[in-house]
Image (cartoon, rainbow, N blue to C red):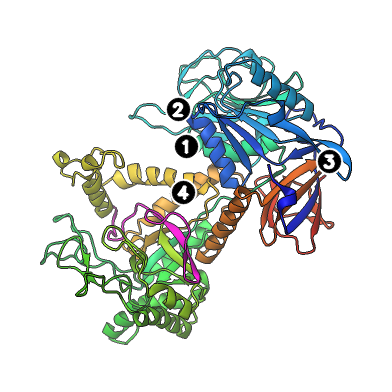
Amino acid sequence: MIGFRRIAFVTTMVVAAAAMGSAGAAAAQVPAGARVELRVLVVSDGGPSTTAIAEELRSEGVPLTEVDLNDAGRPIIDADFLADTISDNGVTRERAHYQAVVLPGPDAFGNATEPAALSAYQQHFDIPQVNAFAWPQAAIGLNPPTYSGPLDGVTATLTTAGQAAFAYLRGPVPFEDNAPAVAETWGFPALPAGATPLLTVTAPDGSAGDTLVAEYAADGRRQLSLTFSYNSAQTQFRLLAPGIVNWMTGGVHLGLTRNFLSVQVDDVFLPDSRWSSSDNCTPGEDCPAGVTTTEIRMDADDASAAAQWQVSQNFELDMVFNANGSVEAAAEAPNGHDPLTDAMVAQPGSFRWTNHTFSHEFLGCLRDNSVIPWRCETDANGDPRWTTQATITSEINQNFTWAATGLLPLDDTELVTGEHSGLHILPQQPADNPHLAPALAATGITWLAADNSRMPQQVAVGPARTVPRYPMNVYFNVGTQAEQVDEYNWIYTSRSNGGSGICEDNPLTVTCITPLSTGTGYEDYIVPLETRFALTRMLGNDPRPHYVHQANIAEERILYPLLDSVLTRYRSLLADNAPIVNPRLSAAGAEMLRQDTWRAAVAADQAGGYLQDKQVHVVAASGVAVPITAVTGTLSGGSAFGEEYAGSRSAWTTATAGTVDLVLP
């Protein structure tokens, strides 16, 4: 529990709270004067469903306490664990430790005493309960199921009551289809026996049972039950997760969520090496001496197409550029002008621009490329030889200077180094270049891109913080769909099928596939799969950007079918009240830092809040921004509180005068 008296400097926000009800549920009847902590109790059996809900709570920043039923030393869920009394200015008040409870199912404990204590607690303080994966039964207002089996590939639909509870969804909730692999989603659709169906489905065998998510109010308790299995990465859960949190908290909780998507196009103005389909390698990377291919570089038409695509999709790309590519192209042009540069600079307001260094030089150790893979050059003592601070500083500043001559709108605090170099890369370079941090300080860089597959967490590098980026599975060295599929087949097929065998050598992390058709495999297989991955990340309150390369918007412009698929899929499932948030690198980094700071404050018992007499009091250590979600109609000083998003009002809030009064309708 949050130790309010232990916080030396606090920010207090007072929120007049609405009834913690939901679709079909009665208004809350919290005892007058009682205090309900803004914290969720998650009782887990170790299964993926309760784990998924706990991950969603952490993702949004909702304080939670987890109890593992498999832990022999776990606390007993009794009256003392759930509630106590406190003295408030001489007045003794009841205190409920949790605003909501998540259980694996209604029969989670295997004893009678803990469920009895929990029921009494819920009845007394009006505490909602979520049954993460429940067998349909009378205790949750459902009849026994008429179908029990896989639900992979089905599309469920929100009922009228469900659309009120999940107001940010359009209605369809598709379940991932994992065929021909073993089915991953099992469910037990059932007819209601007093419960209100929120999500229904036609069972694969056509049987009458239809309810997959149901709300049930009886015996002074409110329960939300899900009758299908899921994990935190599956689309169906990701779509429902914020609504589950809002249901259990009555739409008033600490934490908030947004759906982010940013796509950064690296190497703009530079040519990229092309994949050799005959030798299964890339010149300059891993090809034997003598293997060559033509390079891939955007042209003026590609620049115009990029601008037009952004308008058509109402989505902004980030152009991550290396000016030396323009300088060299201009030097080779008969008139001294690079057509690509002219086309890009002619419409500077069409794109966001980010410094990618002048020439894409590797800024880590000096590389010995006489071997594959490369290794760091070493001095007489066996220590790595590093790219100097002067070189790093020059690479950054030359790009800034060139951009200023073309009046490209830059955020001078952002930097993407070539290959994310300067940062450590295993196994060859286990440490950061010691000259990187001083160079960042000298050039004013505070946000530095990193590869999420190597450095998934944000870390400090001198004055800068890293911003992990997701690599999209569209390769830097391909300009056509056939090239993309050929390289994809090389990576993901067995040796007997003509592939590299990487999938055979790493079965825990890579799955072998049947070779794809170079004519249809991209749009039939790669695009749908990458769409699912991107959608999962978008729905996870994750501001990390994605990155691709300029080759992918040149020649056949293969990036656009993928992004079209992602955007179309998102907009077909999410309502207009949940627009995509499209931050640039610095804004994504700031959001990650804010999220991490808040979670650390909660973990250190330096932030929390409670509900009392229909007011919410939020406290946090000085300087900590607090994420708050409240119901639509909430006012702050007579004006609308926060931002309308996904059917709620929410905002990061830091009180400067000590108190912020938020009044809910």
- Find residue 377 and report its horizontal and vertical position in percent: 21, 71
- Give the amino acid type for the residue marked by disc 3 in the picture: Ser
Label 1 crowd bin: few (<14), some (14–19), many (20+), radius 10 Å: some
Circle 4 sits on which residue?
Answer: 566
Looking at the rendered image, the quarter that the C terminus falls into is top right
Q: CA distance from mark 3 to mark 4?
A: 54 Å
Q: Is residue 460 magenta?
A: yes
Label 3 crowd bin: few (<14), some (14–19), many (20+), radius 10 Å: few
Please report the residue visible at 48 percent of the width from the left and 16 percent of the height from the top. 148
Q: CA distance from mark 1 to mark 4?
A: 16 Å
Please report the residue visible at 56 percent of the width from the left and 46 percent of the height from the top. 59
Report whether 588 appears left or right of 577.
left
Is disc 1 in contact with disc 3, using a CB cutoff of under 8 Å? no
| 227 up-or-down from 328: above or below | above
Q: CA distance from mark 1 to mark 2?
A: 9 Å
Circle 1 sits on which residue?
Answer: 234
Where are the magenta residues, as a range? 452-481
Circle 2 sits on which residue?
Answer: 185
Report whether 212 appears left or right of 631.
left
Looking at the image, can residue 442 be seen?
yes
Residue nearest the observer in this picture, 379 or 140 = 379
Label 4 crowd bin: few (<14), some (14–19), many (20+), radius 10 Å: many
Is disc 1 in contact with disc 2, using a CB cutoff of under 8 Å? yes
- Find residue 308 and report its horizontal and vertical position in percent: 47, 64
Residue nearest the observer in this picture, 514 or 457 = 457
> Does dot 4 land on a helix, a strand or a loop?
helix
Q: Earlier in the sequence, mark 3 or mark 4?
A: 3
Q: Residue furthest left?
A: 290
| 53 up-or-down from 502: above or below | above
Circle 3 sits on which residue?
Answer: 87
> Does dot 2 land on a helix, a strand or a loop?
loop
